[in-house]
Image (cartoon, grey):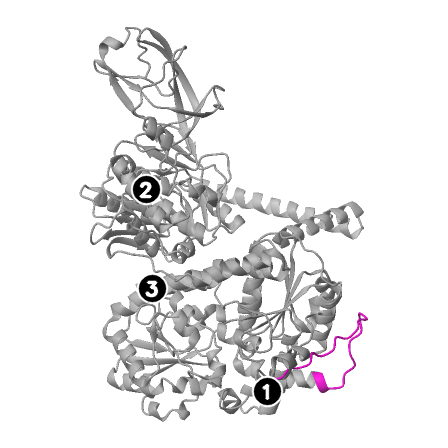
Amino acid sequence: MKGFEEGYEISSLISSLSKEKAEITRLLGEQIKRGDENAEKLIRTESLLAEAQARAHDANSQLVMAQHQCAQASSDIDLLRASTSWRITGPIRALKRLFSGEPLQAAVPVTAAPMPVVPEPASSAPSERTLTVPEPASRAPGARRDVQSSYRNVRIVWIGAEPDTPGFRYRVLYWAEAARAVGAKVTHHRLEAVDSYLDEIRAADIVVLWRAPWSHEVTRVVDAVRQSGAFLIFDIDDLMIEPRVVTTKYIDGIRSQGFREDVIRAHFELVRRTMLAADLCTATTHELASHFRVHQRPSLVMQNGFNETTLSVSRIAARKRRFAQQDGYFRIGYAGGSKTHQKDFAVCVPAVAQILRRYPHARLVVFHDGRGTSILDLHEFPELAALESQIEWRVMVPLVDLPKEMARFDVSVAPLEVGNFFCEAKSELKYFEAALVDVPTIASPTDPYRRAIRHGVTGFLADTTEQWIDAFTQLIEHRELGEQIAHAALNHVLWTFGPECRVDRIASVIDMALRGQSAARAFAFEAMKEALPYRHPEVPASRIVFQHDRLVYSQVTVVIPLFNYERYVLQALESVAAQTLWDIDLVVVDDCSTDQSLSVVVEWCKTNKERFNRVLVLQNTVNSKLGPTRNVGFDNADTPYVITLDADNRLLPTCAEKCLEAARRSAAAFVYPRIITFGADTFVMGDTPYDPARFIGGNFVDAMALISKAAWACVGGYENVPHGWEDYEFWCKLAERGLLGTPEGGDTPLAEYRIHAASMLRQHTNHEANLARTRAFLEERHPWLAIATDRVGDAMKDEPPPVADEPPRLVLPVQAAGTRTIALVSTNTVSSCRSCKNVRSAVRTEEALYGSVVQRRESTFLHCGLRVETHMHEVENVIGSFYAKPVYREVAPSDTCDQYDPAY
């Protein structure tokens, strides 16, 4: 009864509070209705402030993406519009608008832009072709205005002609998101609503038109661009600027969909006219961009790719498939979009039919729209007759849900007609979509797929029926081969087609659009990067010792490489569990420890597994050293970011959260925290501003940092550097690619670095001979390095100290050692100390490393009858390591006075 009474009282209290809340709401409503001006002003001000913050905040772009995804999935109409059939019928709608005789809109009086004159094809004489090409919009006399180089002052307007198709997502939303990430002010719109955003166009620095045929709306856009002097970019993702390919020979969709060639050809002609009015043309592939150059249009490649939402959905779908009960089928998936690809699919049909007959457990997976219309007309493929029981039909889904369907495949096929101009211009979509869900791809060897896929490594290329059959057979009979290939493909696409590469690329495109010296530098930088080959990270073989997966997506994985640190590793693990970033993964890689490190870790992970979204404990099959062991951790991480934590160090609770915030805020490839040392010495490091030129003389960033996994894949991961400094070499590779690093920026240390005698640096790396070999290795690998050494100090180390009129000043303490005294014999004063205001010294050690004094303690003693002051200094910014090991010599007892101060 007592519990019942208490519950009744609580219910009564809640009811009373609800009534009070309702009354307050009613009174507020009456106040507003009475026209309380102050309340209205406050509400309007708060609304405007919230709107401004939302527009400025990066989360706004994610909201836009979510809204677009919901709209796409809201009805069957969206599915229809998402099909190629809808796009192909676009010419009919466009021509109807163009020739309907409707009066021109005249809300804003402008001078109509003339249609560009279409030049002759490439066979014409260059001089004639030059005369017929119209002057680009931004070259009108006096039109171009100066724009500051800062991206935060750059305004960009993206305009899409087909906003209800998947292409709008790839070509408008994703690239607009990338431009926002570098700080530009970006909006995107539907072409047909041009009158509502003409003022934005006039205020813009760059305007991008996607898939837009010349029309009244395009005329309005071009006129506004010419008036303001903005830079006009034309973007396209299909070969729609070449009317000569509009035949059933090149575009089978004309036949399969029953379209008229003259209608499609007229549409392509209008698209080409828009292209000719642009200052710059961008395309999804080099092959497509080459068609711009025939018309003397400057062109760049802006690849299709995926965004973070697609990545997260894909990775969870792949992990669910991995843990789901398998039904034993081998699924060959074809995720085409419409019947326009009948001739393309015919390329692989003979091989598919043979495989289905040879392997009864094989299945062909194809899609229909849910209303009885399939994307393939199987009646055109007699080879598949009598195989209906092995054909699995699935209902088409919105693009956002496609990864869930593709994750069911065991192989994805991307057949295209090799040599067909229209097909050769197609992008690598099917390759990276499959890779994201751990599915290997067999593709026709068009030029884009040849560049993307390394045959037998990241996928298969098949040109003949025999090659298709061979690829299918290998994957069916060797399932582990498919897993290896899919995983290699995943590492490849993370950067190549991912959002971070898109951010990197859009910065260069903006620079080129702004022209001048920044354009020249951006072009040179892009050309240099284009020449760099992709290198797969060296990932040693390993086995899973323990795993736990809640199938929830995290943003950060902490990777701990482990070798014989059973004494310290529990502290490292506890520090990860204490992170304030709740959604976090943990990967520990044991490099064949000879102590009990592995069993200690496994027991801890079994006990604490529920703290993490995902836990994975691995062991290398052979001892592989630190760099490759870190690669194993990165390779098995399933998050956008990784924090590297050595097993003898510790993270402070807010480290992951703060570093992730800094990465999102700056779009940096890596973020390094402020670190405080503990153990044998105490000082702070990691607060140095990022300046890649610092790497020339030595390392200034500790290995303990938050790193983009895509950036790791981009540069080929860590190397096995002899004797250590793997992290230094890794930072050099990131710097060479122009990838940004940044300190976390706070005043509080976020991690702890242990200084102890058993560390790898003290036991191995910092031996003089090893240091010399490591320097030589790094300087050969990165010729721009000139790692600092104290040549003057080295040359003078055997000379007797100069005789001084005043007592000598030593900068590290004299220490008692039994019956002898060990005294420091070498220092090098470089500037005044910030603490004692007297001296700041660079300490020459046995390894010729250097550091800056940040704190001192004093003592005095008598030596050979002289009064000597000693200073104990804390050291920071040590090149090559993060502590200084001083050089001592032994002094005979007879040379030492009784008054030696034993404070040290």
Q: Please determine whether, in this image, residue 287 is positioned above or below residue 342.
A: above
Task: Tell me, yes or no, whether the highlighted magenta stretch contains residue 659.
Answer: no
Mark 2–mark 1 Cα distance, whole angstroms, equals 63 Å
Q: Where is residue 226 in the image (x, y as percent from the top left)?
A: 73, 68
Three-letter code, disc 1:
Ile
Residue name at image x 46 percent, y 51 percent: 669
**Crowdedness near tag 1: few (<14), some (14–19) or many (≥20) residues, C-alpha within 10 Å:** many
**Crowdedness near tag 2: few (<14), some (14–19) or many (≥20) residues, C-alpha within 10 Å:** many
Q: Residue 488 carries which label?
A: 3
Q: In which quarter of the image is residue 410?
A: bottom left
Q: Please determine whether, in this image, residue 366 is positioned above or below residue 183.
A: below
Which image quarter is the N terminus in? top left
Q: Position of residue 197 (x, y in %)?
A: 71, 65
2 vs 3, front mark? 3
Q: Residue 264 carries which label?
A: 1
Left or right of residue 458, residue 525 in this image: right
Q: What kind of secondary structure does the magenta stretch mostly adopt? A: loop
2 vs 1, front mark? 1
Nearer-N-terminus badge (1/3)? 1
Residue name at image x 31 percent, y 64 percent: 322
Task: Tell me, yes or no, whether the highlighted magenta stretch contains residue 118.
Answer: yes
Left or right of residue 142, residue 689 in this image: left
Q: Which mark is residue 573?
A: 2
